[in-house]
Image (spheres, helix red, strand yellow):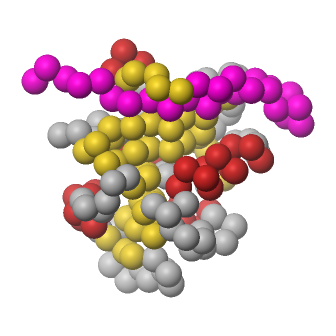
Amino acid sequence: MIHNNISIIVAIAENFAIGKNNDLLFHLPTDLKRFKSITTGHSLIMGRNTLLSLPKWPLPNRRHIVITDKKDDVFPGCEVVFSIDEAIEKVKDEKEAFVIGGGMIYKQFYPLAGKLYLTLVHKPFEADVFFPKIDFEEWEEKEREDLFDEKNGFEYSNINLERKPTNT
């Protein structure tokens, strides 16, 4: 079942790579600003490794919901849940909540999300974590900005997508 209030925000390489050694593959300051402007004031849903990879947490002005399978996990300033369903229940009355990773969390939320805020870097990267393959036929492009990062020397696009209605 699609949850229209669940959105995924992710930066991926053209080979769907998203991370290596529990870190991002590239540093795009404009993408980090975009992430902040889109997610501020909303709930963030993430796995424990994603939380632990953040330089500082909790991120200001955002509710943090951390999915873990470790019953003893406690993360100050964050809410801990033990399933995807429990996370969805926590945000059911919110207009929009953001799934921010990592790979296993994205994989489980991808079929459920109504929106996808995608930063697509137009080159492949070596990685150990990948985003699920996106079937762009299932999504309607609502907004797109094509950019070039001088520091990294590559092109990338910010693409906002909404899932097309299904006829089921």
| Point 40% across, 21% down: residue | 140
Q: Position of residue 53 (x, y in %)?
A: 62, 63
Q: Which quadrant would residue 25 be assigned to in this image? A: top right
Can residue 16 be spotted in the picture?
no
Find out whether residue 165 is within the magenta segment: yes
Q: Quadrant of the C terminus?
A: top left
Residue 12 sits above or below residue 74 on the image: above
Q: Residue at x 23, y 25 (%)?
A: 165
Residue extent of the magenta highlight: 144-168
Give 97 or 127, whichever is nearer the viewer: 97
Residue at the spot 50% in from the left edge and 81% down from the top edge: 77
Please give left or right for residue 108 compared with residue 73 in the image.
Answer: left
Q: Name the residue nearer the viewer: 22 or 6.
A: 6
Q: Where, quadrant-wise, is the N terminus in this rendering?
A: top left
Q: Is residue 58 magenta?
A: no
Lateral position of residue 73 relative to residue 22, left or right: left
Q: Provide residue 118's location: percent of width, then percent of height.
A: 54, 34
